[in-house]
Image (cartoon, rainbow, N blue to C red):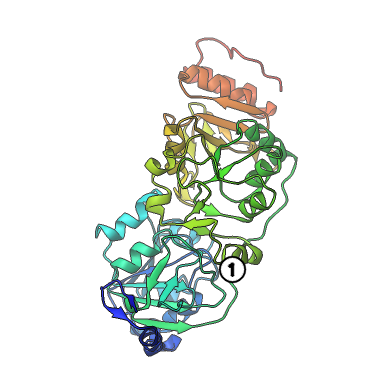
Amino acid sequence: MNATRTGKALRQSEVSQLYRSKLVSLETAAEFIQSNSRVFVSGNAATPTPLLEALAARKDELQNVELVHVLQLGPDPFLAPEMEGHFRRRSLFVGPADREAVNTGRADYVPISLHQVPWLFKRGVLPLDFALVQVSPPDEFGFVSLGVEIIAAKAAVESARKVIALVNPQMPRTLGDTFIHVSKFAAFVEVDMPLPILPRDPFGEVEAQIGKYVADLIDDGCTLQMGIGAIPDAVLANLQGRQDLGIHTEMISDGVMEALERGLVTGIKKTLLPGKVVGTFVLGSERLYRFVHNNPLFEMRPADWVNNPFNVARNDKMIAINSALEVDLTGQVCADSIGTRIYSGFGGQLDFIRGAAASNGGKPIIALPSTSKQGTLSRIVPLLKPGAGVVTTRADVHYVVTEYGVAELFGKSLRERAQALIEIAHPNFREELAKAAFERGLFPKSYPGSTTA
């Protein structure tokens, strides 16, 4: 016997019967969705693409359906011009699929820190009619796992009037607060398809140097948060010799898996869930998805727990490593937009920056190359571009790292910040930045520091 979330006890034979009674085709599943409704769609590697395609095929039958999601991967059938009036996206984190639509007014963007996303559904700010998710097959007790995407999917499933799931045997059964009983679902569609993978590009000399500077800020026993990309990979490559590192992060990546395999990460010094690798979503290679399957090292939880700055701060020596599109001379960090053009979203940057700052011995770090556009533009700038959003305020920034060094800003005045940031800017732009700082009134005279590397 086992209990459902409604308290009703079911025998295992009854669980199997209940599950099978809810199996439907993609077309039938799509027919649950009604006009004038709000639909949550799980994202990242759990994007339920076949369900979305089946739903898009019903466009002539539906009006004013809002799709709420974090980052979506794969082709987007809802952004074609003929979908206007039928479907509209409300994006909580913008990606390549919906970036153009958001910036041309055909889709909406909600600026929000990731730990607050589940609150939208739990607190009824965005009441949900339906939720579309992708899950692992049910176990013998009737529980499916949300697998590689927890973030806000748990809150959405528990808040929506009706929940429809793709059941995919290639979805890993991750452990933690990931399980939903089959009795909660209105319908299941069985598929067998590989999850999206995220290719990795090798890091270059610039990222390697940034990685060295960041690694110098990391001691034995620190707990790390980092994303995916060249800089996190370069940081991990420079941590050889460190002992007993821990992981409490938003995203579980191939780099995390490799750090475990190299023995860099044991988690035994963690002060919150020692021994556990904590995350809220998994994105990477097929090998990574196999690695997290039924792996008790991993504790997957919703974003309002993982990314909650209070919980982040419960990890002593918490190191948060995040990036930016540009940083101005006072320390303001733009990470979600290029001027007025929305590029991505808040994600968990501010969650972890503030959590690490409050941690005993913690260090919040912004790491970025000093230039973009093949060295023609400085990413340390006098002023953020007009219309650019500030994701991390200058009051929250402690460390900024480029390939030219580390600027420690905590406790520094505006003048001292400008000086420190100019010193880690690319040498080709330092004189220009110093002049801008003088004209802005940050320097009383000429630039008081060196303009050489």
Asked if 217 appears above or below 157 in the picture, the reply is above
Q: Which residue is mark 1?
A: 196
Residue 127 spot, x, y in % from top left: 26, 65
- In this view, the residue in front, 234 or 262, is 262
- In this view, the residue in front, 383 or 307, is 307
> Which residue is outermost to the right?
205
Label 1 element class? loop
Q: Is residue 136 left or right of residue 186?
A: right
- In this view, the residue in front, 15 or 84, is 15
Amino acid type for the residue under numbered disc 1: Pro
Quadrant holding the C terminus: top right
Q: Identify the image quadrant of residue 431.
A: top right
Q: Identify the image quadrant of residue 199.
A: bottom right
Circle 1 packing at 10 Å, graded few (<14), some (14-19), many (20+), is some
Asked if 266 appears above or below 421 in the picture, the reply is below
Asked if 345 appears above or below 376 in the picture, the reply is below
Residue 71 spot, x, y in % from top left: 48, 60
Please tell me which residue is depicted at 70% across the width and 49% down the height of the picture: 262
Q: Is residue 231 left or right of residue 143?
A: right
> Which residue is outermost to the front?
1
Quadrant holding the N terminus: bottom left
Is residue 325 in view from this perspective?
no
Q: Is residue 405 left or right of residue 140?
A: right
Please tell me which residue is depicted at 50% across the width and 71% down the height of the picture: 76
Residue 72 spot, x, y in % from top left: 49, 64
Please tell me which residue is depicted at 53% across the width and 57% down the height of the picture: 298
Please tell me which residue is depicted at 56% across the width and 45% down the height of the picture: 267
Residue 196 spot, x, y in % from top left: 59, 68
